[in-house]
Amino acid sequence: FEKAFIKLIVAYDDGGGFVSNTNDNSIVTKIMFEDTSFLLMSNCGFDCTERISTDITKSNVLVIDGSCDSMTLTFLQKVKPEVAVFNGEICPQTKSTFEYLSIPIYSTKDNGDIRMESDGYNFNLKYLKSR
């Protein structure tokens, strides 16, 4: 794992302290291994994604919670994920944004746990069990 790198991004690390919307206080994690990357958004909402957008570049896999305030079209166009993993319920508006951009969706709500693997050049996602 010499070429693996983990970056923790704190949206409100500007000295102003935490914000009242606790979801926007989430820590975003980017895992990079060779040529593949995974962006784990936690509960990062609209304001949070706006604040971190300067720190974020393309990621192969985007993992988000699927709430209605979890993703903007502008952010998705910057990240350009090849696939999205939703942890839980998917808001119809959020789902339609991914469909508009033709980004394949994996959902833990519909199919259970998802394993994400990479050899550094390719990645693979698969359901561990079917519900």
Image (cartoon, grey):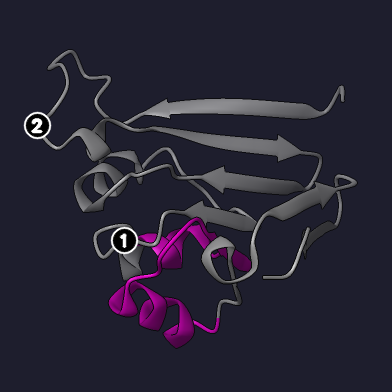
Callout 1: helix, strand or loop?
loop
Nearer to the camera, 18 or 7? 18
Callout 2: helix, strand or loop?
loop
Work out which residue is located at the far top of the displayed protein and give it. Answer: 15
Residue 27 percent location from the top left of the image: 40, 30
Which residue is labeled 1 in the image? Answer: 67
Nearer to the camera, 60 or 113? 113
Quadrant of the rendered structure where residue 51 is? top left
Quadrant of the rendered structure where residue 5 is? top right
Q: Is residue 98 magenta?
A: yes
| Quadrant of the image containing the N terminus | top right
Residue 96 percent location from the top left of the image: 38, 83
Work out which residue is located at the far right of the displayed protein and give it. Answer: 119
Q: Is residue 16 left or right of residue 23?
A: left
Residue at x-position 24% and y-position 26%: 12
Disc assigned to residue 20: 2
Number of numbered discs on residues: 2
- Lower position in the chain sequence, tag 2 or tag 1: 2
Nearer to the camera, 89 or 34? 89
Residue 113 percent location from the top left of the image: 67, 55
3D distance between C-alphas at marks 2 and 1: 18 Å
Depicted 11 relative to depicted 2: above or below? below
Q: Which residues are magenta?
A: 75-102
Residue 98 percent location from the top left of the image: 45, 77
Specify few, some or many for label 1: CA neighbours under 10 Å numbering under 14, 14-19, or 20 or more.
Answer: many
Specify few, some or many for label 2: CA neighbours under 10 Å numbering under 14, 14-19, or 20 or more.
Answer: few
Depicted 50 relative to depicted 76: above or below? above
| Amino acid type shown at disc 2 | Ser
Residue at x-position 63% and y-position 47%: 38
Disc assigned to residue 128: none
